[in-house]
Image (cartoon, rainbow, N blue to C red):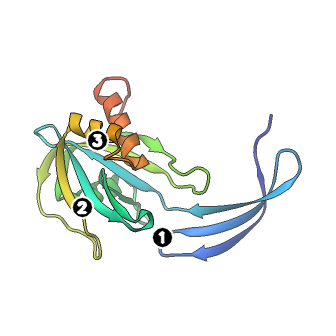
Amino acid sequence: MDLVEKQLSSELVYQGGFINVRKDRVALPDGNESSREYILHPGAVAVLAITPEGELVLERQYRYPAGREFIEIPAGKIDPDEEPEQTARRELLEETGYRAGRWTYLGTAHPCIGYSNEKISYYLAQELMLSERQLDAGEFLEVLTVPLEAAMNMALTGDICDSKSIVGLHWLAAYLGGRMRGVEI
């Protein structure tokens, strides 16, 4: 069965600082037509940074769209003409002040497939060295280090509840347990 929806027309309905919203008219597999509204996103990275003491680096920050604070893994959007690996290195330093001597690519996930083309590439950062944070203007967050097992439990109790961090913790557990491969970079 062919499930592909074919674009008939496309309209830019909003152009923002880093996201755009489109409304397309599509032909459905059964021949009928429908509309699709979706966000075009430049992509993002998420970093699972483990200190030499075996603690996971987390952040606590307020997220305006949800109207509350979250505890999450470091992450950020990919800038134009930037490779995801570069973004991971930049975001870890900017937000936490850590540099990593060892990097492993874990995989890419699509967090919002019903309304966005966003992709998040996940990286494990090890052999951390602390230097100085370089937060962007208007960026406010608290850096936490938590024992790895405690961080895993925080995802089970709901203290960590954003999908990016939950996926990252799941993949980290699989990688550390030998059930998932990573690519050293």
- Give me the disc on residue 154: 3
The answer to whether the residue labelled 2 contacts the one labelled 1, judged by CB atoms less than 8 Å apart, is no
Query: Distance of mark 1 from mark 3, alpha carbons?
Result: 31 Å
Q: Tell me what residue is drawn at x 58 percent, y 63 percent.
A: 39
For marks 2 and 1 on the same chain, the one whose residue lies earlier in the sequence: 1
Q: Tell me what residue is drawn at x 36 percent, y 42 percent.
A: 168
**Element marked by disc 3:** helix
Q: Which residue is mark 2?
A: 95
**Element marked by disc 2:** helix
Query: Distance of mark 2 from mark 1, alpha carbons?
Result: 19 Å
In this rendering, would 121 be left or right of 34? left
Q: Amino acid at mark 2?
A: Glu
Residue 8 screen position, x and y as percent: 81, 61
Q: Pointer 2: residues within 10 angstroms few (<14), some, or many (20+)? A: many
In the rendered image, the quadrant that contains the C terminus is top left
For marks 1 and 3 on the same chain, the one whose residue lies earlier in the sequence: 1
